[in-house]
Image: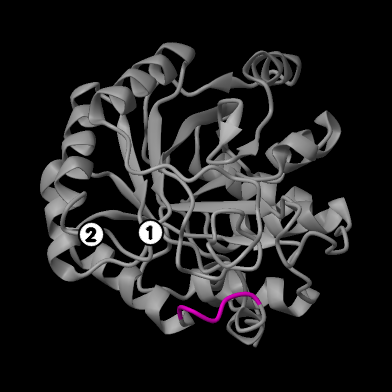
Amino acid sequence: MDLLYRAHKVHREAFVDHEIQLSSLMSIKTGGCPEDCAYCPQSAHHEIELENERLIEPDRVLAEAKAAKARGATRFCMGAAWKSPNARDFPRVLEMIRGVKDLGMECCATLGSLNEEQARAMKDAGLSYYNHNLDTSREHYGKIVSTRSYQDRLDTLARVRDAGIKVCCGGILGLGEAEQDRAKLLMELANMPRHPESVPINLLVKVKGTPLEDADDIDPFDFVRAVAMARIMMPKSYVRLSAGRHDMDDALQALCFFAGANSIFFGEKLLTTANAAVDHDLRLLARLGLKPQVSAQEPAKEIESERSILERTGNAVPA
C-alpha cells in the first residue's frame, strides 16, 4: 500500500491527473523473423500457425492510422518482424512515417536493430519514438534470446537517442524470471543516459508453439508492483500497459492506472495477439473517471528525485 501511495503521488506530480494516452499498434511485416526470442510467435525458429506477410503497402498503413486517430489514438506504432530493416523495404517505412506525421499523430516504430544512418533517416522522416525492448535483466536474458546480445540492444538504443528520437523501451514479465530480475530490468532502464520517454510493461502472452507456452503465471500484484516501481524510478516517462491486457481483469488494470500507468495500446490486436476490445476500454476508463489524452504532452513539471530530496533535507540516502 505504501508503494502504491508513493507511485501515485509521483505520477500526479509529473502528469495531468486522470489522463490516459491511447496508442495503436499495427504489424506492417509479419512472421519469419530470424531472431529466436522464446516468447515471440513471429520467430522463424518456432512452430507457430502464423501466416507470414511481407511489408504491406503504405496506403494500407495510413488508412489504419486514420482509423486509429478517429477512435481517439494519439500515437501510432508500427512493428516489423525483422532483425534489422533491409535496403529494399526501408524507403517504404520512411514513407509510412512521413504519412503518419502528416496526420498530426506521434509515430513510433519497432524494426529491430538499427545503424546510425537508419536512425538519422527516421528522425528526418519525423519519427517520434523508436521501440526496442530489453525484455528482462542481463542475467536472465540469455535464457530468452540467443541471436542478439543485450549489448546489441543497448547499442541500437544509443543510436536512436543520439539521432534525437525518443526512446521507447521496457520489458516483459512472466518469462520465468526471478523477482530480482524484474528489479534489475528497471534499474537498467532507470540508469540509461536519459530515462526512456516511454516504458512499456508487458505481461507474457503465452502462445502455443513457443518455448514459453507453459510458463508459470506471475502473481498479478507483482505486476502492479513493477508498474509502481517503474513510475517511481522514471517519474517523467509514459508507463504503458502493453501486451497481456487482454487477460487482465478490470480491477487489475485499475490498480495499474493508480500505480502510474498512463498509456495503453488501444485496438483489438497487438501485432499477432489479441488485445482488449476498444468499446470495453472506453467503458472502463469512463467507469474509473479517466479520460483519453487529447494530444501528446510533456510531463507537467520537473520532478525532484527522491534521492535529491533526501540529500537536500539531510536525511540518509539509501545505498
Q: Which residue is mark 2?
A: 86
Question: Is residue 105 or residue 243 the one in the foreground?
Answer: 243
Kindly indicate whether the residue at mark 1 contacts the one at mark 2 (C-beta within 8 angstroms): yes
Question: Is residue 253 or residue 8 the one in the foreground?
Answer: 253
Q: Residues within 10 Å of mark 2 (few under 14, many from 20)?
A: few
Element assignment for label 2: loop
Q: Which residue is mark 1?
A: 82
Residue for point 38% across, 79% down = 152
Q: From the viewer's perspective, is 191 left or right of 107?
A: right
- Magenta region includes residue 235: no
Q: Which residues are magenta?
A: 144-148
**Kind of residue indicated by mark 2:** Asn
Element assignment for label 1: loop
Q: Residues within 10 Å of mark 1 (few under 14, many from 20)?
A: many
105 over 41 or under it: above or below: above
Q: From the viewer's perspective, is 233 left or right of 124?
A: right
**Alpha carbon distance from label 2 to label 1:** 8 Å
Residue for point 29% across, 72% down = 158
- Magenta region includes residue 145: yes
Question: Is residue 133 or residue 232 the one in the foreground?
Answer: 133
Residue 251 pos. (x, y %) = 85, 33
241 over 188 or under it: above or below: above
Residue for point 71% across, 44% down = 244
**In what quadrant of the picture does the C terminus appear?**
bottom right
Residue for point 32% across, 28% down = 61
Residue 128, quarter of the rendered image: top left
**Kind of residue indicated by mark 1:** Trp
Q: From the viewer's perspective, is 251 left or right of 36?
A: right
